């Protein structure tokens, strides 16, 4: 199979929100009444929501609301104290991290974590290797499978670098790339693992408005290739512009869930973001 | 001081640049010339013209053999430390396992008296060393950084103490009459004799070339990318689908196999193995060689291993104001390392994966015109 391109399961109409079809869609990631405690600290308290295939879900909340904790629980880094997280119907906890990646979940990091001493191309190739089967012996003896996968991986990596717009920088060490390029490279690397679900942890942090706009475009393009996107962000404007649905966390609890418009007008959300005077509460 | 260093640096970079820009055939010719040079090196007819390079206080051919073993070990340790980023302080322990496997299975002074030929035992030695690498790695590779260093340090000491005190491994008395590698000249004289170290050196040199090709194949594949990604950021590597534990174990096993091979070669040449051959200092020297040469770079490891082993031997037989310099060899060695860490912490020939970059840049220029 030379064509590794993702074909969308449901053709996404440009501009049409996926919301109306959500009911018919299959759940991809289920966060089922998850509580997570670190000693006495309750980082997540009975959080419960579902991510459906083909949508862009925004997970928002003020600083310290538990967004990244929730994210880490979803990607298998933390084990929930109570409740469970299911990805494509299977329980996440107890699975090896690289296995979760193979199941189709990929992520980027809030504080960029590339492989700094590898070139941009190699960074993406590492992601592409996730599905490669060349054994150590096959690599040592340069068996045909090595050449085949090496060629495929390289082509895929170049294609993805082209997609995120930094192909011209592919032989640069990751640490020499600009901040924005590094963010894009992280997305390319995550996409190289052929994800069904792409989790972006504050991908726009530190971006200026123009860069944010480009990022929105990119996220939409990714969704249009059939990848479901989970977006963690605290920039409300960015989230409103791109997501189909939004889940809001505050102090480790889900305080709202719904369409961007609904969430924006939700008094609880406004209170969480802006604060409310004591007498009003 | 800094200007001199800058000049040196830019000079070296110019050489590197020129190397990467040179046409393919030029590189092959230079490489071939270098290999021929090293094959010719142990001949007295050749090295007597090399001025101060041969060692005055020791048989130069013997020294070359020692150096070649160090180079082989440095290439192996470079996989573990340089590529996978696992700090292994007990690497020489694997060398001991290789040497002792050969000794026990071939020597007439061994208790089990199998007396197998050397060549048959070499693959067994490599296999056993790999197994010992996996056995050490399985519980310890879950540890990171300093902890791993401590455990591997303990492993090397364990092997040494076992060799010293176990009756089976003969301690100081050691094993003698370990057979040499096979092969005869036309007149029936053995190719691998007692006095002439040249054939052993050639054998090791040939194996170094093969091992380097193998290591290069690994590092220029998904295996090497996995190793480097683990070194760079183990968590991120895991989340990008790299089975990190498996590849760390492979790095350990591959490094151990090379050390086992070196141990088998050493035993076959030395013909005698006892517990004094495996001091902790050797592990440190090889680690220093890898870091000195440029960790994460195969050429760096070769140069590091060669230079460090050579420097130590070069002091033999030199007297200054009535002081035998050889006695102080590790003092100088330490000094060089300290200076090195101050002025060039990345090693003599640091890891630069830029060959492809130069190639593609030129391509782009051509396309752009």
Image (tube, coloured by chain):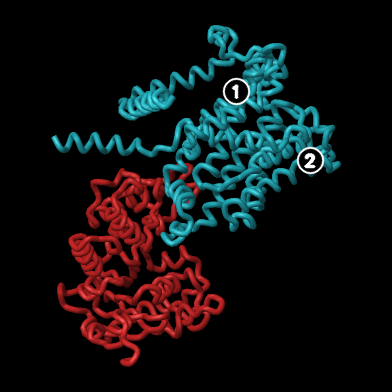
Chain colours: A red, B cyan
Q: How crowded is mark 2: few (under 14 residues within 10 Å), some or many (20 or more)?
A: many
Quarter assignment of residue B313 = top right
**Residue A90 visible in the snapshot:** yes
**Residue A247 visible in the snapshot:** no
Residue that label 2 marks: B163
Image quadrant containing the N terminus of chain B = top left
Q: How crowded is mark 1: few (under 14 residues within 10 Å), some or many (20 or more)?
A: many
Residue that label 1 marks: B310
Q: Do labels 1 and 2 share a chain?
A: yes
Q: Which residue is at 72% across, 12% downward?
A: B322
Quarter assignment of residue B189 = top right
Residue A214: image location, x then y, percent: 19, 62
Residue A136: image location, x then y, percent: 50, 48
Q: Which of marks 1 and 2 is nearer the N terminus?
A: 2
Q: Which residue is at 64% across, 37% downward?
A: B284
Nearer-the-camera pick, B95 or B121: B95
Question: Residue B250, relative to residue A76: is it above or below?
Answer: above
Left or right: where B274 falls relative to A266: right
Left or right: where B222 falls relative to A164: right
Nearer-the-camera pick, B344 or B279: B344
Under tag 1, what secondary structure? Answer: helix
Nearer-the-camera pick, B219 or A233: A233
Under tag 2, what secondary structure? Answer: helix
Residue B291: image location, x then y, percent: 53, 36
- Callout in the foreground (1, 2): 1
Residue B296: image location, x then y, percent: 48, 40
Q: Which residue is at 78% across, 43% downward?
A: B161
Specify the subunit that label 1 lies on.
B
Name the disc covering residue B16, or none: none
Left or right: where B85 falls relative to A168: right
Specify the subunit that label 2 lies on.
B
């Amino acid at each position: 199979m030379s064509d590794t391109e993702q074909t969308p399961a449901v053709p996404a109409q440009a501009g049409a929100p996926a919301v109306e079809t959500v009911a018919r869609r299959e759940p991809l990631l289920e966060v089922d009444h998850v509580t997570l405690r670190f000693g006495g600290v309750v980082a997540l308290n009975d959080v419960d929501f579902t991510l459906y295939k083909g949508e862009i879900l925004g997970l928002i909340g003020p600083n310290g609301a538990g967004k990244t904790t929730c994210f880490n629980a979803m990607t298998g880094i933390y084990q929930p104290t109570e409740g469970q997280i299911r990805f494509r119907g299977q329980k996440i906890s107890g699975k090896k991290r690289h296995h979760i990646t193979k199941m189709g979940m990929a992520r980027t990091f809030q504080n960029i974590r590339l492989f700094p001493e590898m070139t941009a191309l190699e960074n993406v190739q590492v992601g592409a290797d996730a599905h490669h089967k060349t054994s150590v012996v096959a690599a040592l003896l340069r068996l045909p499978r090595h050449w085949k996968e090496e060629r495929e991986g390289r082509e895929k990596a170049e294609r993805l670098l082209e997609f995120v717009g930094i192909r011209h920088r592919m032989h640069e060490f990751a640490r020499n790339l600009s901040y924005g390029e590094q963010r894009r490279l992280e997305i390319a690397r995550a996409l190289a693992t052929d994800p069904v679900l792409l989790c972006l942890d504050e991908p726009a942090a530190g971006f200026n408005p123009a860069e944010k706009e480009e990022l929105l475009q990119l996220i939409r393009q990714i969704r249009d290739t059939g990848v479901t996107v989970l977006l963690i962000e605290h920039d409300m404007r960015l989230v409103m512009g791109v997501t189909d649905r939004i889940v809001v966390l505050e102090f480790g609890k889900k305080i709202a869930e719904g369409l961007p418009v609904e969430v924006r007008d939700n008094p609880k959300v406004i209170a969480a973001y802006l604060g409310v005077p004591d007498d009003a509460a | 001081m800094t200007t001199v260093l800058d000049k040196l640096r830019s000079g070296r970079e110019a050489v590197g640049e020129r190397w990467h820009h040179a046409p393919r055939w030029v590189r092959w010719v230079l490489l071939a010339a270098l290999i021929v040079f090293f094959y010719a090196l142990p001949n007295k007819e050749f090295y007597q013209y090399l001025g101060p390079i041969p060692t005055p206080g020791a048989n130069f051919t013997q020294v070359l053999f020692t150096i070649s073993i160090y180079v082989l070990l440095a290439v192996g340790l470079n996989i573990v430390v340089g590529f996978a980023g696992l700090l292994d302080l007990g690497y020489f322990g694997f060398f001991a396992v290789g040497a002792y496997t050969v000794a026990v299975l071939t020597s007439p002074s061994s208790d089990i008296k199998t007396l197998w030929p050397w060549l048959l035992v070499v693959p067994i030695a490599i296999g056993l060393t790999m197994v010992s690498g996996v056995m050490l790695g399985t519980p310890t590779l879950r540890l990171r950084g300093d902890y791993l260093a401590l455990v591997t340090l303990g492993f090397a000491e364990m092997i040494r103490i076992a060799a010293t005190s176990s009756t089976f491994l003969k301690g100081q008395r050691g094993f003698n009459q370990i057979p040499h590698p096979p092969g005869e000249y036309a007149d029936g004289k053995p190719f691998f004799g007692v006095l002439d170290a040249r054939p052993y050196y050639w054998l090791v040199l040939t194996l170094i070339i093969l091992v380097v090709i193998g290591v290069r194949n690994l590092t220029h594949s998904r295996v090497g990318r996995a190793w480097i990604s683990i070194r760079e950021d183990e968590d991120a590597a895991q989340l990008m689908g790299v089975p990190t534990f498996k590849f760390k174990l492979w790095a350990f096993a591959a490094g151990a196999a090379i050390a086992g091979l070196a141990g088998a070669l050493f035993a076959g040449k030395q013909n005698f193995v006892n517990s004094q051959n495996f001091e902790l200092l050797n592990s440190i020297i090889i680690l220093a060689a890898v870091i000195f040469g440029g960790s994460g770079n195969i050429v760096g490891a070769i140069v590091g291993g060669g230079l460090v082993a050579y420097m130590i031997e070069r002091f033999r037989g030199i007297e200054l104001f009535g002081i035998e310099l050889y006695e102080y060899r590790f003092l100088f060695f330490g000094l060089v390392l300290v200076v090195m860490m101050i002025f060039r912490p990345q090693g003599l020939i640091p890891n630069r994966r830029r060959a492809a970059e130069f190639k593609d840049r030129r391509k782009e220029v051509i396309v752009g015109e």
